[in-house]
Amino acid sequence: MDETNLINSAQNGDIEAFNRLVLAYQEQVYNVALRMLLNEDLAEDATQDAFLSAYRHISHFRGGSLRAWLLRIVTNRCYDELRLQKRKPQEPLHPVDGETGEEQEDPPYLRDNHDLPEEALARKQLESAIHNCIEGLSNEYRSAVVLVDIQGLDYKQASQVIKKPIGTLKSRLARARLGLQDCLQGAWELLPAEYRLNQEGINE
Amino acid sequence: MNDKYSLKEIELLSCCLDDELSPSQKKELQARLKANPGLREKYASLQRTRSILRKTPQRKVPRNFTLTVDSSKTMLRNPPLVSLLRFSSLMAMIGLVFLMVFQLLSATSLPQAKEVSQPTDLMAAVPENQREGLPLIIQWGTPMNLLAYGIGGGGGDGSYPIISYTIPREPSEEIVSMDNPPIEPPLVAAEPPTLKSTTPEEQKPTGLELVGSQPLLGVQPPNVRGQIIFTNQTVEYSTGFETTTEKRDLEPLQKYQIVLAIIAFLSLTISFWLQPKKNHKKLH
């Protein structure tokens, strides 16, 4: 069954059809939430909320890109969460284990990763560097860079997701890249060698 | 380094990286890049940044986010009462804001209450040798035999200049002493009041003389109702009384504001209390 038929079925209340759409897009939706919120638990909640909201409002979906529609929902959910965090910072000094409820002795950001395979370690270092730099961006710049550079959306799709004109997106993206460039340059030496790229020309 | 180039130039470089420039813009930018090594370096730096971001690893989802029939019906759906309470809270807030704006506009449109100052024309009636050093006492309607000088202790020594405002009275009307206060004081001035300055020695109680110019409270006799008694002298005082009356009219507004604020607060509080708590971990 193609996507249009699945959407039609979901609009008629077929939850199985909707779940097939969920399986198709959940990774992308989750990754957008994760890069926006920079927190696995919050990203999980935001993704779940986004799919629930999508199911409730799928009758309002009037065609176009379902991916852009879903990403818009999760992006808005992330904005809400970030605004909430700004008002009430909730990051504990020592993170609490979700299962036992006890304080973690070695939260992920303090863990020694030397026992990981080399490739995984490099990936972890890169992710950590990007995480730190994205954290310094404002919400609007963050969404622009997550959608275009990390998720690979084109300008038209990304502007649909954030519901802003392409000109606004271009401006935000340029500023975000400028900020990230300065930040990543500071961490340049810490990046794995394979990510320290040589200068590339415009015609490449 | 960033200061060397304008945001417009950075935006052009950024769009060029994504191949979002028109052919003419791209050609123009390429020419500038060839001529300007600094701009070329900036472009390369942005390109490296973009390449790194594109290599950000995608995470696997920690679990499936598929919905169940039960969860889709119950999650995030507010009970009708919660929606109703939130709506009533919103309406109360709007009403409150409306009333506040209305009150503000009403208050600013009213004439400001004027502080009654010593009338200069009355001061002119005081002999010059008595203007300085002694406080001026203006008597408003107090019979001379009940005169107090306003210096505490129930009276003074009579050494202060006094301006009395005399209102002509009907001979038949009597001044009633404070021991036997009138129920309806029939105090009416048929003509504008006359102004005279008196020294303490000249002040003698007169039986029918009514002294004072403050608005006299009471019911007028039927034959003089509707007549204009005071004109120039009472303008300031009348204005002051109008202001007071208008302020009294605003008091019910404040009561409504308080009621609306309470409704808004209670509705919102109860709606948050009744709102179902989210717990996604229990979904699957």
Image: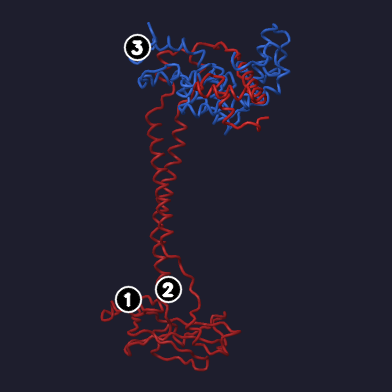
Chain colours: A blue, B red
Per the image, the residue denoted by label 3 is A9
Q: Residues within 10 Å of mark 1 (few under 14, many from 20)?
A: few
Image spot of residue A108 (x, y percent): 67, 17
Which residue does the numbered mark 1 point to in the structure image? B219
* Chain for disc number 1: B
The residue closer to the viewer here, B246 or B55, is B55
Give the residue number, with chain letter if any, for mark 2: B237
Q: Position of residue A20 (x, y in %)?
A: 43, 9
Callout 1: SS: loop
Instruction: Looking at the image, tell me whether mark 2 or mark 1 is earlier in sequence order.
Output: 1
In the rendered image, which quarter is residue B182 located in? bottom left
Real-space CA distance between mark 3 and mark 2, rounded to the nearest whole angstrom: 79 Å
Secondary structure at badge 3 equals helix
Same-subunit check for callouts 2 and 1: yes
Q: Quadrant of the N terminus of chain B?
A: top right
Amino acid identity at mark 2? Tyr
Query: Residue reaching furthest bottom?
Result: B201
Q: Is residue B128 above or below residue B250?
A: below
Q: Position of residue B272 (x, y in %)?
A: 47, 32
The picture places residue B240, in percent across and down from the top left corner, at 43, 69
Residue at 43%, 11% (x, y): give it.
A21
Q: Disc 2 vs disc 1: which is toward the camera?
A: 2
Question: In the drawing, does residue A117 fall left or right of residue B61?
Answer: right
* Amino acid type shown at disc 3: Ser
Viewer-closest of B241 and B104: B104
Q: Quadrant of residue B217?
A: bottom left
